[in-house]
């Protein structure tokens, strides 16, 4: 059949296009039903080390999205040698299982941030966000001085409840809290309690003092808290080489 006869027949073109799309979709989807798990198991001493964000980190992620950080920074290290040398271990599917939406991608105007947590000090992040070229001369990143304004967090419980509706294991009842204690440990479970969201947010900001100003909770506190968490939930030294390759 000649190309011209297909391209000039709208009905036939639509049918053939749908067939091709269906075949492509089946090739990608069907194999998933024959894999025991596509999400890696990341447990240390019987506890899941990958957990949902605390209320402060969640607000930081909201700000990260609001400011469009994802348009220049991906959070997905691919399993290639050059990426591993620059960024570290390739990203695990499990590391994004509580993200809605996830921050994968290949657009890197700036470096990938999947493992930026604890790589720099809080002070470095604050200075870099306020005036990027003061720490990285070649940076083309905009300045974000307004992040030092007070953080709005009165609706953080509603934000957590919305995520709970799509499967993120935040707790509101004693039973849900106990499940999280068994799954993540008590220290993490406390930060997943919706009813104590504001209290936990204020406490984490005061303890971390991410923006260097202990007198108030700012958007900078939240964003830096989020950035410092990225890539830190998995301690790869506790797993044998090739452990995570079994899930690929």
Image (tube, rainbow, N blue to C red):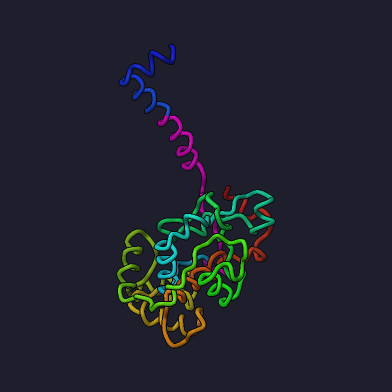
Is residue 145 in view? yes
Image quarter in which the N terminus is found: top left
Seen as rendered, the residue at the extreme bottom is 215
Is residue 189 in view? no
Name the one closer to the observer, 73 or 79. 73
Residue for point 60% across, 75% down:
121
Residue 181: x and y in percent read: 45, 74
* 243 lies left or right of 179: right
Part of the protein shown in magenta:
21-48
Q: Is residue 124 above or below residue 3?
A: below
Residue 177: x and y in percent read: 39, 74
The answer to if 24 sits in the magenta stretch is yes
Residue 66: x and y in percent read: 39, 63
Residue for point 58% across, 65% down:
116
Residue 109: x and y in percent read: 55, 54
The quarter holding residue 233 reads bottom right
Figure label count: 0
Name the one closer to the observer, 51 or 228. 228
């Amino acid at each position: 059949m000649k190309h011209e006869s297909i391209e000039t027949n709208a009905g036939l073109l639509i049918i053939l296009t749908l067939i091709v799309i269906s075949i492509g979709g089946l090739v990608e989807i069907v194999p998933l039903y024959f894999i025991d798990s596509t999400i890696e198991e990341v447990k240390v001493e019987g506890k899941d080390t990958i957990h949902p964000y605390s209320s402060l980190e969640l607000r930081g992620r909201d700000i990260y999205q609001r400011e469009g950080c994802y348009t220049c920074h991906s959070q997905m290290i691919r399993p290639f040698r050059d990426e591993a040398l620059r960024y570290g271990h390739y990203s695990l599917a499990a590391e994004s299982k509580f993200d809605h939406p996830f921050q994968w991608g290949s657009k890197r105007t700036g470096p990938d941030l999947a493992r930026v947590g604890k790589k720099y000090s809080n002070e470095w992040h604050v200075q870099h966000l306020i005036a990027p070229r003061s720490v990285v001369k070649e940076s083309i990143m905009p300045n974000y001085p307004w992040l030092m304004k007070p953080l709005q967090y009165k609706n953080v419980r509603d934000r957590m409840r919305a995520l709970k509706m799509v499967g993120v294991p935040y707790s509101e009842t004693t039973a849900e809290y106990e499940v999280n204690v068994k799954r993540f440990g008590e220290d993490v479970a406390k930060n997943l309690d919706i009813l104590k969201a504001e209290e936990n947010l204020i406490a984490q900001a005061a303890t971390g003092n991410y923006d260097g100003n202990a007198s108030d909770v700012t958007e900078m506190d939240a964003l830096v808290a989020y950035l410092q968490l990225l890539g830190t939930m998995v301690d790869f030294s506790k797993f044998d080489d090739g452990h995570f390759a079994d899930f690929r």
